[in-house]
Amino acid sequence: MGYTDHPDGKECFQKIWACTKYSGMLGLVVSTYDVLMYTKPQGYVPTLGAYLRSTVPLAGAGAAFAAVTCASTALRGKDDKLNYFLGGSSAGGIIGVAARSFRVGVPTAFFLGVCAIVYKDSKDCGWKLFPEVTHRVGSFDHINYDFTLQKPHK
Protein backbone atom coordinates (compact mmCIF):
# COMPACT_ATOMS: atom_id res chain seq x y z
CA MET A 1 0.00 0.00 0.00
CA GLY A 2 1.58 3.23 -1.15
CA TYR A 3 0.72 6.84 -1.79
CA THR A 4 0.32 6.43 -5.55
CA ASP A 5 -1.92 3.35 -5.45
CA HIS A 6 -5.07 5.47 -5.78
CA PRO A 7 -5.77 8.62 -7.80
CA ASP A 8 -5.42 11.98 -6.08
CA GLY A 9 -8.50 13.03 -4.13
CA LYS A 10 -9.60 9.42 -3.47
CA GLU A 11 -8.92 7.14 -0.52
CA CYS A 12 -7.57 9.95 1.65
CA PHE A 13 -7.14 7.89 4.82
CA GLN A 14 -4.96 5.32 3.05
CA LYS A 15 -2.83 8.11 1.59
CA ILE A 16 -2.51 9.74 5.02
CA TRP A 17 -1.49 6.41 6.54
CA ALA A 18 1.12 5.78 3.83
CA CYS A 19 2.71 9.23 4.21
CA THR A 20 2.62 9.09 8.00
CA LYS A 21 4.25 5.66 7.97
CA TYR A 22 7.15 6.70 5.78
CA SER A 23 7.72 10.09 7.35
CA GLY A 24 7.55 8.47 10.80
CA MET A 25 10.24 6.01 9.74
CA LEU A 26 12.35 8.96 8.55
CA GLY A 27 11.72 10.56 11.95
CA LEU A 28 13.02 7.44 13.69
CA VAL A 29 16.18 7.52 11.58
CA VAL A 30 16.70 11.23 12.29
CA SER A 31 16.02 10.66 16.00
CA THR A 32 18.46 7.77 16.19
CA TYR A 33 21.15 9.85 14.54
CA ASP A 34 20.40 12.72 16.93
CA VAL A 35 20.54 10.49 20.00
CA LEU A 36 23.68 8.60 19.01
CA MET A 37 25.74 11.29 17.32
CA TYR A 38 24.60 14.74 18.38
CA THR A 39 22.82 15.28 21.69
CA LYS A 40 23.76 11.99 23.45
CA PRO A 41 21.16 12.21 26.23
CA GLN A 42 21.87 10.38 29.48
CA GLY A 43 19.03 8.17 30.74
CA TYR A 44 15.81 6.73 29.42
CA VAL A 45 13.52 9.74 29.81
CA PRO A 46 15.76 12.25 27.99
CA THR A 47 16.35 9.68 25.24
CA LEU A 48 12.62 9.13 24.84
CA GLY A 49 12.13 12.91 24.76
CA ALA A 50 14.73 13.24 22.02
CA TYR A 51 12.97 10.55 19.99
CA LEU A 52 9.59 12.23 20.42
CA ARG A 53 10.99 15.68 19.59
CA SER A 54 12.03 14.53 16.09
CA THR A 55 9.70 11.66 15.21
CA VAL A 56 6.33 13.22 16.04
CA PRO A 57 6.78 16.42 13.99
CA LEU A 58 8.07 14.54 10.96
CA ALA A 59 5.21 12.03 11.12
CA GLY A 60 2.81 14.96 11.52
CA ALA A 61 4.34 16.69 8.51
CA GLY A 62 3.74 13.59 6.38
CA ALA A 63 0.16 13.35 7.59
CA ALA A 64 -0.41 17.06 6.94
CA PHE A 65 0.98 16.76 3.41
CA ALA A 66 -1.31 13.88 2.51
CA ALA A 67 -4.38 15.35 4.20
CA VAL A 68 -4.07 18.84 2.70
CA THR A 69 -3.21 17.51 -0.76
CA CYS A 70 -6.12 15.08 -0.78
CA ALA A 71 -8.57 17.58 0.69
CA SER A 72 -7.63 20.37 -1.71
CA THR A 73 -7.89 17.99 -4.68
CA ALA A 74 -11.34 16.89 -3.56
CA LEU A 75 -12.56 20.42 -2.74
CA ARG A 76 -11.18 22.17 -5.81
CA GLY A 77 -12.09 19.37 -8.18
CA LYS A 78 -8.77 19.81 -10.01
CA ASP A 79 -5.73 17.57 -9.97
CA ASP A 80 -2.88 20.02 -10.45
CA LYS A 81 0.38 21.17 -8.90
CA LEU A 82 -1.23 23.77 -6.64
CA ASN A 83 -2.66 20.99 -4.46
CA TYR A 84 0.80 19.56 -3.97
CA PHE A 85 2.26 22.98 -3.23
CA LEU A 86 -0.36 23.50 -0.53
CA GLY A 87 0.38 20.06 0.93
CA GLY A 88 4.14 20.64 0.94
CA SER A 89 3.69 24.08 2.49
CA SER A 90 1.54 22.65 5.27
CA ALA A 91 4.20 20.02 5.98
CA GLY A 92 6.83 22.75 6.21
CA GLY A 93 4.55 24.70 8.52
CA ILE A 94 4.34 21.72 10.87
CA ILE A 95 8.13 21.54 10.98
CA GLY A 96 8.29 25.28 11.67
CA VAL A 97 5.82 24.95 14.53
CA ALA A 98 7.87 22.08 15.97
CA ALA A 99 11.00 24.24 15.77
CA ARG A 100 9.05 27.16 17.31
CA SER A 101 10.53 29.46 14.74
CA PHE A 102 8.95 31.55 12.03
CA ARG A 103 12.39 31.85 10.43
CA VAL A 104 12.52 28.05 10.05
CA GLY A 105 8.89 27.48 9.12
CA VAL A 106 8.46 29.85 6.18
CA PRO A 107 11.53 28.79 4.16
CA THR A 108 10.85 25.13 4.95
CA ALA A 109 7.25 25.51 3.83
CA PHE A 110 8.31 27.15 0.57
CA PHE A 111 11.04 24.56 -0.05
CA LEU A 112 8.77 21.57 0.62
CA GLY A 113 6.05 23.14 -1.52
CA VAL A 114 8.46 23.42 -4.46
CA CYS A 115 9.67 19.85 -3.84
CA ALA A 116 6.06 18.67 -3.93
CA ILE A 117 5.53 20.47 -7.26
CA VAL A 118 8.59 18.69 -8.68
CA TYR A 119 7.24 15.35 -7.40
CA LYS A 120 3.83 16.01 -8.99
CA ASP A 121 5.50 16.92 -12.27
CA SER A 122 7.49 13.69 -12.20
CA LYS A 123 4.28 11.75 -11.61
CA ASP A 124 2.41 13.53 -14.42
CA CYS A 125 5.17 13.48 -17.05
CA GLY A 126 6.44 9.99 -16.29
CA TRP A 127 10.06 10.78 -15.46
CA LYS A 128 11.67 9.25 -12.40
CA LEU A 129 12.65 11.52 -9.55
CA PHE A 130 14.73 8.72 -8.05
CA PRO A 131 15.59 6.16 -10.73
CA GLU A 132 15.68 2.52 -9.75
CA VAL A 133 19.16 1.17 -9.21
CA THR A 134 19.80 -2.54 -9.61
CA HIS A 135 22.55 -3.78 -7.35
CA ARG A 136 24.11 -6.94 -8.68
CA VAL A 137 27.13 -7.26 -6.42
CA GLY A 138 26.16 -8.32 -2.92
CA SER A 139 22.60 -9.22 -3.77
CA PHE A 140 20.90 -12.49 -2.97
CA ASP A 141 21.11 -13.74 -6.55
CA HIS A 142 24.72 -12.78 -7.23
CA ILE A 143 25.51 -16.33 -8.35
CA ASN A 144 23.46 -15.74 -11.50
CA TYR A 145 25.87 -13.09 -12.79
CA ASP A 146 29.34 -13.48 -14.26
CA PHE A 147 31.80 -11.00 -12.75
CA THR A 148 34.95 -12.26 -14.44
CA LEU A 149 37.10 -9.69 -16.16
CA GLN A 150 37.55 -11.73 -19.31
CA LYS A 151 35.01 -14.16 -20.73
CA PRO A 152 36.34 -17.65 -21.40
CA HIS A 153 36.74 -18.65 -25.05
CA LYS A 154 34.46 -21.39 -26.27
Image (tube, rainbow, N blue to C red):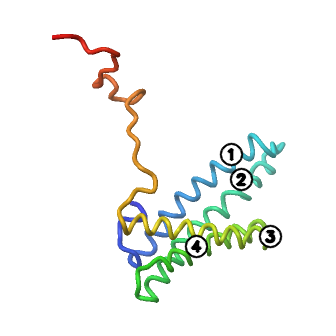
What residue is shown with label 4? 64
Earlier sequence position, callout 2 versus callout 4: 2
Q: Secondary structure at mark 4?
A: helix
Percent across and percent down for residue 135 are 40, 34
Toward which corner of the image does residue 52 lie, by quadrant? bottom right
Q: Say if mark 2 contacts mark 1, CB within 8 Å.
A: yes
Earlier sequence position, callout 1 versus callout 3: 1
What residue is shown with label 3? 101
Amino acid type at image mark 4: Ala
Percent across and percent down for residue 84 are 51, 74
Q: Nearer the viewer, residue 65 or 115?
A: 115
Sort mark 2 into few (<14), some (14-19) or many (20+) by Cα contacts within 10 Å. Answer: many
Q: At 76% from the left edge and 53% from the top edge, which residue is drawn?
A: 50
Percent across and percent down for residue 151 are 26, 15
Q: At 35% from the left edge and 70% from the top edge, which residue is drawn?
A: 6
What residue is shown with label 2? 51
Residue 138, compared with residue 94, is above or below; it is above
Earlier sequence position, callout 2 versus callout 1: 1
Q: Nearer the viewer, residue 81 or 29?
A: 81
Q: Secondary structure at mark 2?
A: helix
Toward which corner of the image does residue 87 lie, by quadrant? bottom right
Q: Nearer the viewer, residue 125 or 23?
A: 125
Compute the Cα span from label 4 to label 1: 23 Å
Q: Secondary structure at mark 3?
A: loop
Earlier sequence position, callout 4 versus callout 1: 1
Residue 25, compared with residue 75, is above or below; it is above
For marks 2 and 4, give the one nearer the viewer.
4
For marks 3 and 4, give the one nearer the viewer.
3
Q: Say if mark 3 contacts mark 4, CB within 8 Å.
A: no
Which quarter of the rendered picture does the N terminus lie within? bottom left
For marks 2 and 3, give the one nearer the viewer.
3
What residue is shown with label 1? 32
